Image: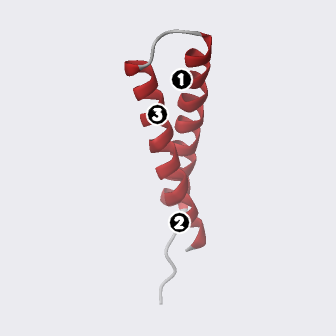
Amino acid sequence: MEKRIFGIILLLLGITGLILAATNFMYDGSGEKNIKEIIIFGILGVLFFFVGAGMIRSTKDKPT
């Protein structure tokens, strides 16, 4: 159960990171700092998203 909750948290963090990367890409001007933020948010967002989704999918419920 704890793995599934941790997976959900990672999945939500991944979605948040991807949204931040998209908003920085769409609305902020160009510049070295902005490009670094987009890359960092994008990579961490994708990483957290897929790790969280994998944890949710691989965790089995115990019968009660």
**Is 39 above or below relative to 45?**
above
**Is 42 above or below relative to 45?**
above
Amino acid on which the number 3 mark rests in the picture = Leu
Position of 13 with respect to 19 (left or right) is right
Q: Position of residue 43 (x, y in %)?
A: 58, 30
**Is 9 above or below relative to 43?**
below
Q: Position of residue 50 (x, y in %)?
A: 53, 43
Mark 3, residue position: 20
Using the numbered discs, state the Cα–Cα distance from disc 1 to disc 3 in whole angstroms. 8 Å
Q: Report the residue at 55% width, 18% height from top.
A: 34
The quadrant of the image that shows the N terminus is: bottom right
Mark 2, residue position: 4
Q: Position of residue 57 (x, y in %)?
A: 48, 57
Mark nearer the viewer, 3 or 2? 3
Whether the residues at callouts 2 and 1 have beta carbons within 8 Å, the answer is no
Amino acid on which the number 1 mark rests in the picture = Ile
Amino acid on which the number 2 mark rests in the picture = Arg
Mark 1, residue position: 38
Q: Report the residue at 48% width, 85% height from top.
A: 63
Name which of mark 3 and mark 2 comes first in the sequence: 2
Whether the residues at callouts 3 and 2 have beta carbons within 8 Å, the answer is no
Q: Report the residue at 42% width, 35% height from top.
A: 19
Q: Position of residue 17 (x, y in %)?
A: 50, 38
Residue 8, disc: none
Using the numbered discs, state the Cα–Cα distance from disc 2 to disc 1 in whole angstroms. 28 Å
Whether the residues at callouts 1 and 3 have beta carbons within 8 Å, the answer is no
Q: Secondary structure at mark 1?
A: helix
Please tell me how crowded label 1 is: few (under 14), some (14-19), or many (20+) other residues with Cα within 10 Å. Answer: some
Please tell me how crowded label 2 is: few (under 14), some (14-19), or many (20+) other residues with Cα within 10 Å. Answer: some
